[in-house]
């Protein structure tokens, strides 16, 4: 799925990855922590990180708004590692 999304033009591909992250996060918590989703969520953020570095601050902040909101409300063990690839943009 990540590979297919990256075939889209940027920044649309990054928006789709962000949307996928948000959906997986919600599924993760709705079902009580589905462990294999942790790897997927991490890989999504890892895929996004180099692209975020190249964006101007305003565009990047807009894209990261939903992920930042999740990060701020997250009180789980996920917070200790899942956001590592994009920490500087939160």
Image: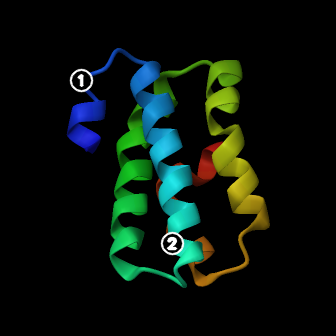
Instruction: Report the number of numbered marks.
Output: 2
**In-front residue for pair 8/32:** 32
In this rendering, which labeled residue sits more in front, label 2 or label 1? Answer: 2
List the single residue furthest toward the top. Answer: 9
Q: Residue at x 35, y 61 (%)?
A: 40
Alpha carbon separation for disc pair 2 and 1: 26 Å
Q: Secondary structure at mark 1?
A: loop
Q: Which residue is mark 1?
A: 7
User: Quadrant location of residue 1?
Assistant: top left
Q: Is residue 90 visible?
A: no
- Up the image or down, 3 lies above or below 83; here it is above
User: Quadrant location of residue 42?
Assistant: bottom left
- Up the image or down, 61 lies above or below 88; here it is above
Q: Residue at x 60, y 54 (%)?
A: 87
Q: At which x and y percent is residue 69?
A: 75, 52
Q: Are marks 2 and 1 in contact (CB under 8 Å)?
A: no
Q: Which residue is mark 2?
A: 28
User: Quadrant location of residue 61?
Assistant: top right
Q: Which color scheme did the rendering employ for the protein?
A: rainbow
Q: At which x and y percent is residue 18?
A: 51, 41
Q: At which x and y percent is residue 60?
A: 62, 28
Q: Secondary structure at mark 2?
A: helix
Q: Decide if residue 56 is on the left or right side of residue 19.
A: right
Count neighbours of disc 2 (C-alpha within 10 A) and say few if under 14, some if 14 to 19, many if 20 or more. some
Q: Residue at x 45, y 46 (%)?
A: 20
Q: At which x and y percent is residue 33?
A: 50, 82
**In-front residue for pair 53/45:** 45
Q: Decide if residue 19 is on the left or right side of residue 5.
A: right
Count neighbours of disc 1 (C-alpha within 10 A) and say few if under 14, some if 14 to 19, many if 20 or more. few
List the single residue furthest toward the front. Answer: 30
Q: Which numbered disc flags the more N-terminal residue, 2 or 1? A: 1
């Amino acid at each position: 799925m990540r590979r297919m999304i990256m075939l889209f033009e940027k920044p649309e591909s990054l928006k789709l990855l962000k949307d996928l992250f948000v959906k997986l996060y919600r599924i993760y918590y709705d079902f009580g922590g589905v462990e294999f989703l942790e790897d997927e969520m991490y890989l999504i953020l890892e895929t996004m990180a180099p692209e975020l570095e190249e964006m101007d601050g305003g565009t990047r902040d807009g894209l990261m708004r939903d992920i930042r909101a999740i990060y701020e409300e997250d009180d789980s063990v996920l917070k200790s590692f899942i956001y590592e690839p994009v920490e500087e943009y939160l």
